[in-house]
Amino acid sequence: MTDNSSLAINRALRQELEGWRRAGLSHLPMAPRKRTAVTPAATSAKPTATRNPPGSKTVSRPMPPTAVRNASRPAPVTLTHALPVASEPLPPSPHPAGSREDREWRLNQLRQRVAGCTRCQELASTRTQTVFGVGNPEARFLFIGEAPGADEDAQGEPFVGAAGQLLNKILVACGLQRDDIYICNILRCRPPGNRKPLPEEAANCREWLDGQIAIIDPEFIVCWGATAAQNLMGTEESIGRLRGRSFQHGRATVLCTYHPSYLLRNPAAKKEAWEDMKLFLKQAGLPVPA
């Protein structure tokens, strides 16, 4: 092995360990443990704006008000699967930090890495293309879904099938457009048969999700469906128990609701989903339709 190769491997390992440390990891578990349910954070607590570089492992831990005020360091977390080796940091951007051009440039760099990702061999061998994400790089609102379906796999854009058409209608009802938001998924490859993402697949894709969140730096994240909510926040609570509550992920307020595909199968749940969207609009300081 050459000296340069050794240095690159050592640098990658140090970056990975530092990412785990920032995420609150104090030890590697000997065996998987059941994760505990999350508790809602106070909606009035003001989060501290932070930016996590692409490749870091961000773990959401909604906390009660006292914990939010008094926590001096992140609590240890339990990992239930092996984490993939993080990629090298993105090269320095040629644009002013935080500018629209800077965010677009960094997202494009990340998109190129995702396009060549083969961490999940089954997904990489069956996909038509990766589905990275789309929208406003300066968006206040980040929407996260589950995984690409057949239409998304064909077009390379999230939420373009029947569920995407319903999402568009929900946006119109909220007085929003796709240009106001950024949309991505837990996975960037379509699982065969549109099956639910496996835990190891979500773990392999987490670096890309964390990178997008760090670059967009949204004020609000809306998780569409249980898969998005559970994987983002590391909880096993059902979407029925998570909706109607607020959580914190970094500086972003997180709200959860039913996935549009679920609403297509269960039209009666649209009323509850609309209540979730009105809560989102109220917390975002936007007009709330009657």
Image (spheres, rainbow, N blue to C red):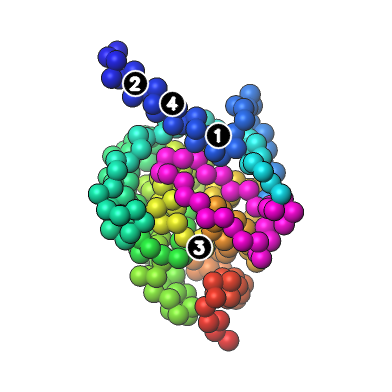
On the image, the x and y values in percent for residue 233 come to 58, 49
Label of residue 21 in the image: 1
**Span of residues in magenta:** 40-69
Q: Dot 2: what SS?
A: helix
* Side (left or right) of 251 relative to 101: right
Q: Secondary structure at mark 3?
A: loop
Label annotation for residue 219: 3
> Is 89 located above or below residue 250 in the figure?
above
Lower position in the chain sequence, tag 4 or tag 3: 4
Q: Residue furthest right?
A: 66
Residue located beneath label 4 in the image: 13
Screen quadrant of the C terminus: bottom right
- Residue 7 is marked as 2
Q: Nearer the viewer, mark 2 or mark 4?
A: 2
Residue drawn at x 65%, y 61% is 45
From mark 1 to mark 2, how far is it between C-alphas?
21 Å
Query: Which circle's residue, 2 or 4, is located before the other in the chain?
Result: 2
Q: Main secondary structure of the magenta part?
A: loop
SS label for mark 1: helix
Q: Upstream in the sequence, badge 1 or badge 4?
A: 4
- Asked if the stretch drawn in magenta spans residue 85, the answer is no
Alpha-carbon distance for marks 1 and 4?
A: 12 Å
Query: In the depicted view, which residue is nearer to us: 110 or 49?
Result: 49
Q: Mark 2 and mark 4: span between their CA atoms?
A: 10 Å
Query: Real-space Cα distance between discs 3 and 1?
Result: 24 Å
Find out whether residue 47 is within the magenta segment: yes
Give how far across and how far down residue 97 sits, in percent. 34, 53
Q: Are marks 3 and 1 in contact (CB under 8 Å)?
A: no
* In this rendering, position of residue 8 left or right of residue 79: left
